[in-house]
Image (spheres, rainbow, N blue to C red):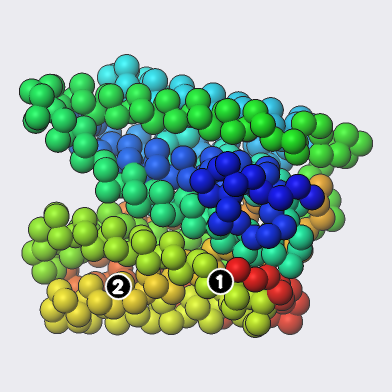
Amino acid sequence: MVRADSRYPLGMLLPASASRDAARLVMARALRGVGDGFASVFLATYLRLLGFSVFQIGAIVTAMLVGSAALTLIVGLAFHRTTARRVLFLAALLMGITGAGFATLTGFWTLLFVAFIGTLNPSAGDVSVFLPTEQAILAGESVPRERTALFARYSLAGALFGALGALVSGWPEAAARRFGWDLAQAFRGGFAVYGLLAVFIAVLYRGLKHGTTRANPAARPTPLRKSRTTVMRLSMLFALDSFGGGFVVDSLLAFWLFLRFGLSLQTVGAVFFAARTLAALSQLVSPRLAARFGLINTMVFTHIPANVFLMTAAFMPTAGLAVTFLLLRMAFSSMDVPARQSYVMTVVPEEERAAAASVTNVPRSLASAISPLLAGVLLQATTFGWPLVVGGALKITYDLLLLAQFGKTDSGSPSAL
């Protein structure tokens, strides 16, 4: 295996056995994080400037989630029919079309269509057409004992650069004020930047050595033939976790802080930048815990404290205490991400990894699209943090079910940082 190329800024930070392809994929993930973090923050404001109603804005966001889930599922299940690099090139093309569409189109139905077929991600996570193919390749780009560490760097890159993108998302508005530009035009320029990032991502994909041939040319057309039962059980559990997480998506937590404590938008923005940074850095701890305690134990016993902190925040009488417990929650809540990705890639055959990645991630996206509506009803009835309590309780239920069903088959990972 060829060592990760230090010419890529993140290549030198990868595990010792990581390949050059791994460095390219982590860099691509970082660039997507910047684009999503940048464009998704001002998306709703831009659509509002176009005169869209709150319902129409919600419909466009829902179309993004549902469309990404559908494309991710299709790619995962049809992965064996083409080459991985071709899939990634097509995904980069869709990203460019998404940026160009939002930069030039203003009609509701045309933007709804672009949102559905496009790659713009309105949430903090990454459920996109890129995901199953990148994860399937990445699983084989290091020695098995460092697989969890490699997935940790992959997730870290997306989270940290996503936070960076969110931090600079105010630049279009600042530029409009500074130079007297029309605000809507400035936002269109922001979407053009999002589309331009797809060019750099395509260049990274062009240099991939892995994925130039079909993963299994003789494969039967039915995916998940060997691992279907395991993957479906995991998918149902992951969907429960995501359904609980939908009660406490960033936008709803920010809204709750505003309603409950009257915090300013600037203060809430600073809180979420700190929270995302904590969540990103915490993923570096995951490989060490997995090496010592196993992947399932790492997922469960970091997730439960995080959700206890989340539920506790709902009962805090002051903003300072509530924010403290929310930050404590974020310091633990993402440690399960690389362990979860590594576990799925470990328990399925190599030729079924892309399908497993899509089938386990798509239900997460669909489930998280339902619960925000219920959380909104709760917040409309009272400013008490019932969404935090309900979301935390559902996620703890997921943790206990995961431990009960898969704890005995835990696959430890002696990975090292």
Residue 322 position, x and y percent, is 22, 76
Residue 380 position within the rendered picture, expressed as x and y whole percent measured from the top left: 18, 60
- Residue type marked 1: Ser
Q: Mark 2 falls on what kind of element?
A: helix
Q: Please identify the quarter of the rendering in which residue 190 is found.
A: top left
Which class describes the residues within 10 Å of circle 2: few (<14), some (14-19), or many (20+)? many
Are the two marked residues, 2 and 1, in contact with CB atoms closer than 8 angstroms? no
Looking at the picture, tell me which residue is in the foreground, 191 or 370: 191
Residue 342 appearing in the image: no
Q: Which mark is residue 286?
A: 1
Q: Which mark is residue 326?
A: 2
Crowding at dot 1, Cα within 10 Å, few <14 / some 14-19 / many 20+, comes out as: many
Q: Residue at x 41, y 77 (%)?
A: 306
User: Which is more N-terminal, label 1 or label 2?
Assistant: 1
Q: Distance between the Cα atoms at labels 2 and 1?
A: 20 Å
| Residue 333 placement, left or right of 254 | right
Q: Three-letter amino acid code at disc 2?
A: Leu
Q: Residue furthest front?
A: 7
306 lies left or right of 85: left
Q: Which residue is depicted at the point 36% across and 60% down?
A: 276
Q: Nearer the viewer, residue 302 or 196?
A: 196
Which residue in the rendered view is the most extreme toward the top? 104
Give x and y (percent) for residue 261. 11, 69
At horizontal 76% and vertical 60% (from top left) the residue drawn is: 143
